[in-house]
Image: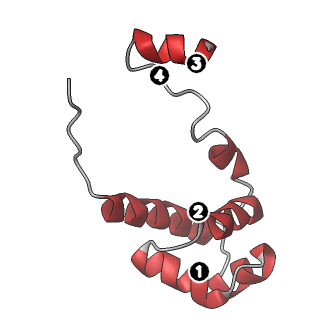
Amino acid sequence: MEKFIWETAEELDQKLAQRVQNIRKRRSISQEKLASMSGVSYGSIKRFETSGQISLISLTKIAMALDIADDIRNLFATVPYRDIQEVINETK
């Protein structure tokens, strides 16, 4: 059975950027301060929050600076099996 995709990759990226921005603002951290804390350039943080575009390494650095790296670590930690063949393939 096919799954329906309700949002585009770009929409998903933008939602992630919005969540990170909300955490940053909740903690009263400016974009400039986050750049300093994370080692990610101010321009990259600004671009991420407006367009959702960022490299994975930069996203990881931002998550570490905001103390939310566990969310990155756990991103694919518990992926459910789609069918019995995936269980068989994993044990090979």
The part of the image, by quadrant, that contains residue 9 is: bottom left
Residue ID at (66%, 74%): 28
Gap in angstroms between the C-alphas marked 2 and 4: 28 Å
Name the residue type under label 1: Ile
List x then y, in percent, for residue 36.
78, 82
Identify the disc placed on residue 80: 4
Q: Which residue is mark 1?
A: 45
Sequence-first tag of 3 and 2: 2
Asked if the residue under mark 4 is in contact with the one under mark 2, i.e. CB atoms within 8 Å, the reply is no
Is residue 73 depicted above or below 65 in this figure? above
Look at label 3 and name its amino acid. Glu
Residue annotated with mark 2: 23
| Location of residue 38 by image quarter | bottom right
Instruction: Tell me if residue 67 comes above or below residue 58 in the rendering.
Output: above
Marks 3 & 2, CB-CB < 8 Å contact: no
Q: Nearer the viewer, mark 1 or mark 4?
A: 4
Q: Secondary structure at mark 1?
A: helix
Circle 3 residue:
90
Closer to the eye: label 1 or 3: 3
Q: Secondary structure at mark 4?
A: loop
Is 2 placed above or below 68 here?
A: above
Instruction: State which tag comes first along the sequence, 1 or 4.
Output: 1
Between the C-alphas of marks 1 and 4, the distance is 33 Å
Task: Give the mark, 1 or 3, whose residue is nearer the N terminus.
Answer: 1
Instruction: Tell me which residue sits at (68%, 61%) in the image.
Output: 60
